[in-house]
Image (cartoon, coloured by chain):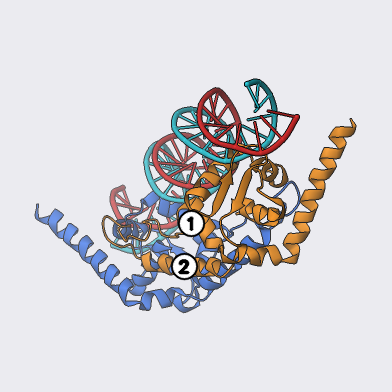
Chain colours: A blue, B orange, C cyan, D red
Amino acid sequence: MTAMLDLALNAQDGPVPLADISERQGISLSYLEQLFAKLRRGKLVNSVRGPGGGYQLAYEPESIQIVQVIDAVNESVDATRCQGVGDCQGGDECLTHRLWCDLSKQIHDFLSGISLADLVARQEIQKVALRQSQRVANKIQASSVE
Amino acid sequence: MTAMLDLALNAQDGPVPLADISERQGISLSYLEQLFAKLRRGKLVNSVRGPGGGYQLAYEPESIQIVQVIDAVNESVDATRCQGVGDCQGGDECLTHRLWCDLSKQIHDFLSGISLADLVARQEIQKVALRQSQRVANKIQASSVE
DNA sequence: TTTAATCCCGAGTAATTTAATCAGGTTTAA
DNA sequence: TTAAACCTGATTAAATTACTCGGGATTAAA
């Protein structure tokens, strides 16, 4: 989720390489590669290979819901232990099956109501993003001076 | 949660022994003991020792919210990795900190709106409970016949 | 007063999930 | 030709969850 938001925030100048996201967000490159493989299979991002390449959102940030990102990576938000099937107690429903189904729906609905664009627009997120790109800029400068 | 609901459902005739809950819900006795130690520390249940003893709800089922049970056992419902502190990225907030805080609140509110009594009243839960006590009754009969 | 039902406690284990590493590729702009 | 970037599969590490095990303490009832 953090990586997708970073992608949305830095999309203005062409494809965003995973190495940059790794640097800004402190997520290992190999791990990002696995996540983006799933996101690509889920058709949420497009990849551009070769130098100058990277990833791009497959749609406008307005039409990408948080829940889609989670679904693509996790294959579903689900609070039940039986993945909603209802065989939690030896082939039958356990006492609390419906409770967890209801909770799952609640979470799903909440995350459906928020798009990537909503997050990008939030002030506190812009503040964090600014801090992150400045930190990276400083780091680069420091290493070129040494 | 399942164990607490079982307790509420079977409270009519005195303290409920963990062995019965274990039998009905298919949860191991030792594990139940650990869970109820936490529930007792959280003042949600009272224990009665000795033969004929067991556990009782500390309050009316109407005034026990689902979220209290989960809090007592899990020590909190929290979707953030930093437990809400905000030091998720090297001492600072990560990009998605607020999102997960909001989600946590959403879940908390949902589970606050439901009491044990609400669950006890649900038809599908009564149906499951009936099935479970019949299964146990059959088992006892079968073992006495053999 | 003995017994057995029951709660109580702490240490250890197994399975699962999540996050990550590693060691190789392939593609393609410069 | 080179290096930047994506791509893939195998493996590992850490954390969490559910659970086991081996005892001990309390107390109602026989």
| Numbered label tally | 2
- Residue at figure coordinates x 50%, y 53% from the top left: B43
Q: Residues within 10 Å of mark 2 (few under 14, many from 20)?
A: some
Q: Is residue B78 above or below residue A64?
A: above
Label 1: which residue? B71
Farthest-out residue, right: B145
Question: Which of the image's four quarters has the N terminus of chain A?
Answer: bottom left
Say which of B100 and A98 sits in front. Answer: A98
Relative image position of residue A136 (x, y in whole percent): 22, 61
Say which of C8 and A101 sits in front. Answer: C8
Relative image position of residue A70 (x, y in whole percent): 51, 62
Q: Is residue D10 above or below residue A137?
A: above
Dot 2 amino acid type: Leu
- Residue at figure coordinates x 60%, y 66% from the top left: B62
Gap between marks 1 and 2 measured at Cα = 16 Å
Tag 2, which chain? Answer: B
Q: Residues within 10 Å of mark 1 (few under 14, many from 20)?
A: some
Picture quadrant where residue B79 is located: bottom left
- Residue at figure coordinates x 52%, y 50% from the top left: B39
Relative image position of residue D15 (x, y in whole percent): 42, 45
Secondary element type, mark 2: helix
Dot 1 amino acid type: Asp
Residue B103 disc label:
2
Relative image position of residue B126 (x, y in whole percent): 75, 60
Tag 1, which chain? Answer: B
Picture quadrant where residue B93 is located: bottom left
